[in-house]
Amino acid sequence: MMRNHANNNDNDIVRISISLPSDLLDGFERTMKKVGFTDRSKAIQAAMRVFISENEWVSEESSKGAGLIELLYDPQTRNIDKTLTLIQHEYNHIVTSSTHIHLDDNNCLEVIMVRGDAKNIKRLARELAGKKGIKSIRINFVKVI
Ligand code: NI
């Protein structure tokens, strides 16, 4: 990823250049228009803010809670189902259950219900996210105070 500072010292705006699949960009642009964005930069900024806010709990090592890890992945990827199952076995102290939906030839949705320390849930999510074939991961965490 390239990163350059633009000539705008007041707001410290930076310009970046990223690589991404063209169908992902097409989908992003279609969605941003549907929700009313006309400026791609503004839409990406909004998406980044959501990403940051959804993942803020990750830095709170001591929290306890429960939640869902939602994985979208390509079932054609070699050994992916076995890999995902083995990882969940390793974390059986926090995984309470999981549900699987076979969406189409190239998409499966696996929803893993978890309960326990945020730091363990974070570790599990990180391990899952790093596997080949994972298209997206979304974590919904409810903190128990
Ligand atoms: Ni499936």
Image: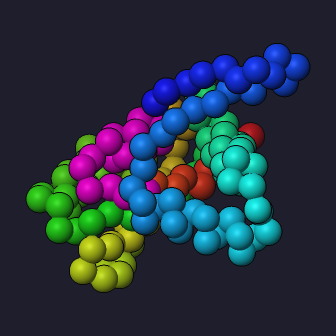
Rendering coords of residue 14 (x, y %): 68, 26
* 97 shown above or below 99: above
Give the image quarter of residue 77.
Answer: bottom left
Rendering coords of residue 100 (x, y %): 35, 74
How many marks overall? 0
Rendering coords of residue 35 (x, y %): 75, 70
Q: What residue range appears in magenta?
A: 121-136
Residue reaching furthest to the left: 78
Question: Could you tell me if residue 56 is visible in this image?
Answer: yes
Please tell me which residue is depicted at 51% across the width and 66% down the height of the picture: 26
The colour scheme is rainbow
Please tell me which residue is depicted at 57% across the width and 63% down the height of the picture: 28
* 35 shown above or below 134: below
Nearest the camera: 136 or 85? 136
Give the image quarter of residue 7.
Answer: top right
Asked if the magenta segment contains residue 4, the reply would be no
Residue 42 appears left or right of 59: right
Nearest the camera: 122 or 7? 7
Q: Quadrant of the C terminus?
A: top right
Asked if the magenta segment contains residue 130, the reply would be yes
Residue 76 appears left or right of 127: left
Residue reaching furthest to the front: 7
Please tell me which residue is depicted at 30% across the width and 52% down the height of the picture: 88
* 19 shown above or below 67: above
Residue reaching furthest to the top: 9
Nearest the camera: 8 or 120? 8
Question: Could you tell me if residue 112 is visible in this image?
Answer: no
Nearest the camera: 7 or 35? 7
Please tell me which residue is depicted at 30% across the width and 83% down the height of the picture: 104
